Image (spheres, rainbow, N blue to C red):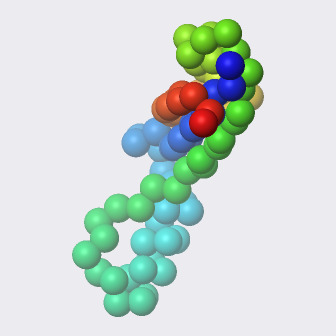
Amino acid sequence: MLYIAEIDVMPQKEILDPQGKAVKLGLNNLGILNVSEVRIGKHITLEIDAENKDVAYQMVETSCKKLLANLIMEDFTIKISPKN
């Protein structure tokens, strides 16, 4: 069965996010002053062929831990849904 995996990889809260700070400064320069924090991350979509949702999740989790996320500085979340 085909599944769509949506992965969000974000810097950990304790880690400085220079891209986020630059975007916040840009927003302030545009007069948008009520944004208190900006964090920039990655959104990754994978199409996975797996026996079931649990197997698909395990495949994606392994991909995140070994390739897609730097676990020292980033956290990730995974959402798996059947492909329609």
Nearest the viewer among 6 and 35 is 6
In-image side of 50 versus 80 (left or right): right
Nearest the viewer among 51 and 46 is 51
Q: Is residue 50 visible in this depiction of the protein?
A: yes
Residue visible at 43% across and 72% down? Answer: 24
As drawn, which residue projects farthest toward the front? 84
As drawn, which residue projects farthest toward the left? 34
Quarter holding the N terminus? top right
Residue visible at 35% across and 90% down? Answer: 31
The percent coordinates of residue 36 (x first, y second) are: 29, 66
> Toward which corner of the image does residue 38 lie, by quadrant?
bottom left
- Give the answer, above or below, for where 65 lies relative to 6: above
- Give the answer, above or below, for where 56 lies relative to 28: above
Residue visible at 74% across and 21% down? Answer: 49
The percent coordinates of residue 48 (x first, y second) are: 71, 26
- Give the answer, above or below, for where 2 lies relative to 35: above
- Give the answer, above or below, for where 28 lies relative to 61: below
In-image side of 20 versus 61 (left or right): left
Q: Is residue 72 visible in this depiction of the protein?
A: no
In-image side of 48 versus 35 (left or right): right
In-image side of 33 versus 18 (left or right): left
Residue visible at 68% across and 25% down? Answer: 2
The percent coordinates of residue 33 (x first, y second) are: 29, 81
> Toward which corner of the image does residue 6 lie, by quadrant?
top right
